[in-house]
Amino acid sequence: MALTKKQLIIIGSILTIVVIGLIVGITVGIVVGRQKSTPLTVERQAYQILEKNPLIDGHNDLAWLIRTNFQNNINNLDLYNMTQYPMKNDTPSHTDITRLRQGQVGGQFWSIYTNCKHLGKDATISFLEQIDIMNRIIAKYSDVFQMATTAEEVRQAFSAKRIASLFGVEGGQAIESSFSILRLFYQLGVRYMTLTHNCNTPWADQNQVDRVNSTLIKNNGLTEFGKKIIIEMNRLGMLVDLSHVSKQTMIDVLNITQSPVIFSHSSAFSLCNHTRNVQDDVLELVKKNQGIVMITFAPIFITCNSTNVGTVVDVAAHINHIRNIVGIDSVGLGGDYDGISETPNDLEDVSKYPKLIAYLLSQENWTHDDIIKLIGGNILRVMEKNEQIAKELQKTMKPQEGLIDRKELEVHNLTQCRNLDMYPTK
């Protein structure tokens, strides 16, 4: 039967649609097939990992930068762009909201720090001022930052697309040898304390006592009072941070603590023999303790060469060395941004973390799971373990009480600005 003209047109249209569909389908299939067969660049892989997993840095001194440059005044400060402001000593800022977002930072331990000149005078006041400045920053930019005090709260903040903000007190001088002040800092959200900065406390030695020909007064590690501080930190669930302390203090803590420790911003002594770095035999103890060493980007601790700031390659070498000794479960990142005057090339500020991750991936001995542990998984594990142990200890252990021995204050010349009314009269 002869087809009518109308029928021929309909059939022709259907055939045309089918042909076009086949062409489009084949083209799409080819494109998709090429996409599947073409591996992602390491840069794209880094982006995808950081998009789904929080990068939690162990140490950032933004609060100190604001104290020294702006006297803690933030009402008229634009934290989205800190590059617009001149800084003391022409040291560039490393941190602002724009660069934190570019660096895909998911969590940050903000350093609560003032220098050792406050020791024995107004140390506690000055540290409280720094907690206040961070609280005000978090409140002012509540759509960007979210306070976190537990591992679960970090995950909640990351899910809400906010930067989980944790506090770490840098320097045991903050507590003025008082269990009460230690506990109050914990109540204010502090989740780690670096036992010393670059000055001894009356109960713990700092790293500079290990320097050749050092004439500093030594405690020979932890005193008996210092050991009680560690016990109380374990009971509270406050992480013990061993960056800045002497080697003997590290060993003493690792022999006492029931909870995993951290080094919030240190690197490998074997690659740079600075007393701020961690020696291999101590790394073996950290492995046994299941703690974490968070590698710093400070050039002087990376290259040990004042004329060479190093590159991302040098930082990666420290990460790999420590990983080789302590294992993948005990290594992390602690940049020390805004606490250092120079940075390695390629790691100039907080926007550059993806470059480090991409470089590690390019070495082909880092899996995606390894990277997830490095950037945040390991510190979350350490936090959770401290939280778990604290809950168990609190069932049977009472809060520490008592005073540091008066002689320990006197030997460090720390009684002039201190009312000694609770000590027996001589």
Image (tube, grey):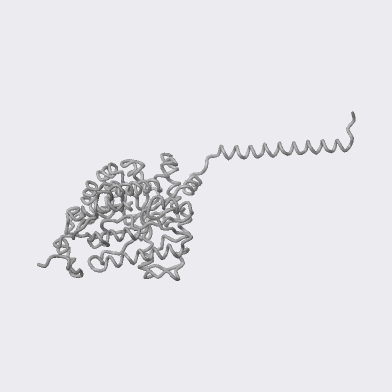
- The image quarter in which residue 283 lies: top left
Residue toward you, 70 or 43 = 70
In the picture, measured across the screen, residue 212 lies left or right of residue 104, that is left
Q: Quadrant for residue 86, please give it.
A: bottom left
Which residue: 78% across, 38% down? 16
Q: Residue furthest front?
A: 395
Give the residue displayed 46% in from the left and 61% down from the top.
Answer: 142
Q: Quadrant of the C terminus?
A: bottom left
| Residue 194 pos. (x, y %) | 29, 56
Q: Quadrant of residue 425?
A: bottom left
Q: Is residue 1 above or below residue 91?
A: above
What residue appears at the point 42 percent right and 45 percent down from the top-left corner?
Answer: 372
Q: Position of residue 118 (x, y in %)?
A: 26, 67
Position of 216 relative to 278 (above/below): below
Could you say where residue 343 lies in the image, as x and y percent from the top left? 38, 56
Residue situated in front as seen by the camera: 207 or 413? 413
Identify whether 60 is placed above or below 129.
above
Residue lying at the far top in this picture: please name it. 1
